[in-house]
Image (cartoon, helix red, strand yellow):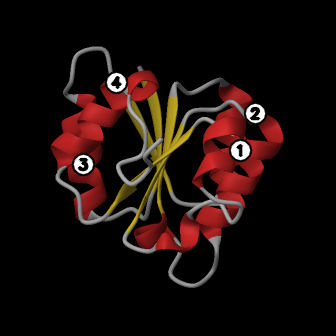
């Protein structure tokens, strides 16, 4: 599985990416800005894009701009957003997001095994806070 991780380039990110990449048949590319996202999307498709809003944003909306770009290119791209804040949920509510996008959200802090579970079972899980 080809995974793109949008997060700042720090030790924690490298450790998470390394642990995910150690799983059978997983490759992980880590980027930290919109320009690199555009370049990566020109190279090919990713099975899942993970955006850690808490680490990459720091007040400059990089995560939001990356998510907007992804939606403009492929509204059906699988995306996992990570954040301790509810600010990065769809402004129209969970139902709208579920019906119109292929996004999942994990609330932070979350153990790495929850992220791995969501990556491997993406199409069978919903967001942890979404209930039908």
Q: Secondary structure at mark 3?
A: helix
Q: Earlier in the sequence, mark 4 or mark 3?
A: 3
> Cα distance, mark 4 to mark 3?
18 Å
> Cα distance, mark 3 to mark 2?
26 Å
Q: Which residue is mark 3?
A: 16
- Most extreme residue toward the right, as rendered? 72
Q: Earlier in the sequence, mark 3 or mark 1?
A: 3
Which numbered dot is residue 89? none
Residue at point 43% right, 65% down?
A: 8
Residue at point 41% right, 19% down?
A: 1
Q: Earlier in the sequence, mark 3 or mark 2?
A: 3
Q: Which residue is mark 4?
A: 121
Q: Position of residue 122 (x, y in %)?
A: 41, 28
Name the front one of labels 2 and 4: 4
Find residue 35 and report its image quarter.
Answer: bottom right
Does residue 94 sit above or below 22 in this rendering? below
Total tally of numbered discs in the picture = 4
In this view of the protein, which residue sits in the foreground, 79 or 97?
97
Q: Secondary structure at mark 4?
A: loop
In this view of the protein, which residue sits in the foreground, 102 or 14?
102
> Cα distance, mark 2 to mark 4?
21 Å
> Cα distance, mark 3 to mark 1?
22 Å
Q: Is residue 117 left or right of residue 70?
A: left
Q: Is residue 14 left or right of residue 98?
A: left
Name the front one of labels 3 and 1: 1
Does residue 30 sit above or below 92 in this rendering? above
Which numbered dot is residue 70? 1
Disc 2 crowd rating (10 Å Cα; few below 14, some 14-19, many 20+) is few
Q: Which residue is mark 2?
A: 74
Q: Earlier in the sequence, mark 4 or mark 1?
A: 1
């Amino acid at each position: 599985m080809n995974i793109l991780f949008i997060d700042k380039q720090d030790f924690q990110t490298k450790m998470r990416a390394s642990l995910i990449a150690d799983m059978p048949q997983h490759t992980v590319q880590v980027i930290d800005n919109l320009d690199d996202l555009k370049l990566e999307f020109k190279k090919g498709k990713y099975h899942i894009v993970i955006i850690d809003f808490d680490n990459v944003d720091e007040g400059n909306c990089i995560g939001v701009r990356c998510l907007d770009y992804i939606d403009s290119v492929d509204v059906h791209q699988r995306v996992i957003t990570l954040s301790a804040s509810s600010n990065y949920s769809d402004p129209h509510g969970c139902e709208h997001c579920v019906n119109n996008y292929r996004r999942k959200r994990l609330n932070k802090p979350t153990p790495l095994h929850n992220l791995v579970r969501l990556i491997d079972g993406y199409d069978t899980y919903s967001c942890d806070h979404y209930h039908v």
